[in-house]
Amino acid sequence: MSPTLNRSTALFLQAAIVLIGSGVLVFLLWEPHLEGRNAQATVFEIYFKDPFLAYVYVGSIPFFVALHRAFGLFGHAGRHGAFSQVTVEALRAIRRCLLVFIGFVVGGLVCVVAWGDPDDRPAGVVMGGLIFLAASITTIAATLCARKLQETLGHSASRQD
């Protein structure tokens, strides 16, 4: 028998994913206005003349794709009441997205250390390190869940034969 997930838990997890995604999106759009160098800048200058900001936005795409896949994963599990091979594939896709996202974070950290303002480096490294840590933990959790679920599904399939 495969592991189950009741509908209310799935809806709660989907709501949490929407809140996380909304919070990150608001932060990505709001934070550039807080930087000291952007105090007197126009909206065009903030968003279209900063190559690092463009890099951050492009690098956030895999994160939002992973959130989308997680939302679908919990929706599928909530509708069907059980995890299946579809959820294993979604977990693997989430893992791949997060690995790409981690690559962007590491690239951003390299840029901050190599070319960033010496006064901004410590804060940038700490923020990047925290993002790296959170993404790494989530990647490991997705990998372990996919493996465990695959083993469980494999055992239940062999028992039915």
Image (cartoon, helix red, strand yellow):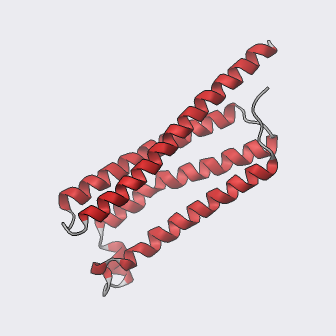
Q: Residue at x 30, y 64 (%)?
A: 123
Quarter of the figure with the C terminus: top right
Q: Is residue 30 left or right of residue 82?
A: left
Furthest residue toward bottom: 40
Residue 7 percent location from the top left of the image: 81, 49
Please tell me whether residue 81 is drawn above or below residue 104 in the rendered image: above
Q: Residue at x 40, y 55 (%)?
A: 130
**Which quarter of the picture shows residue 118?**
bottom left
Q: Residue at x 60, y 52 (%)?
A: 68
Residue 58 percent location from the top left of the image: 41, 58
Furthest residue toward top: 161
Residue 14 percent location from the top left of the image: 69, 55
**Which quarter of the picture shows residue 22?**
bottom right
Quarter of the figure with the N terminus: top right
Query: Is residue 15 in view from this perspective?
Result: yes
Number of numbered callouts drawn: 0
Q: Residue at x 80, y 40 (%)?
A: 80
Residue 52 percent location from the top left of the image: 30, 64
Query: Is residue 97 in view from this perspective?
Result: no
Q: Is residue 98 left or right of residue 11?
A: left
Please tell me whether residue 156 is drawn above or below residue 145 in the rendered image: above
In front of the other: 76 or 3: 3
**Which quarter of the picture shows residue 39?**
bottom left
Q: Is residue 132 left or right of residue 20?
A: left
In front of the other: 140 or 56: 140
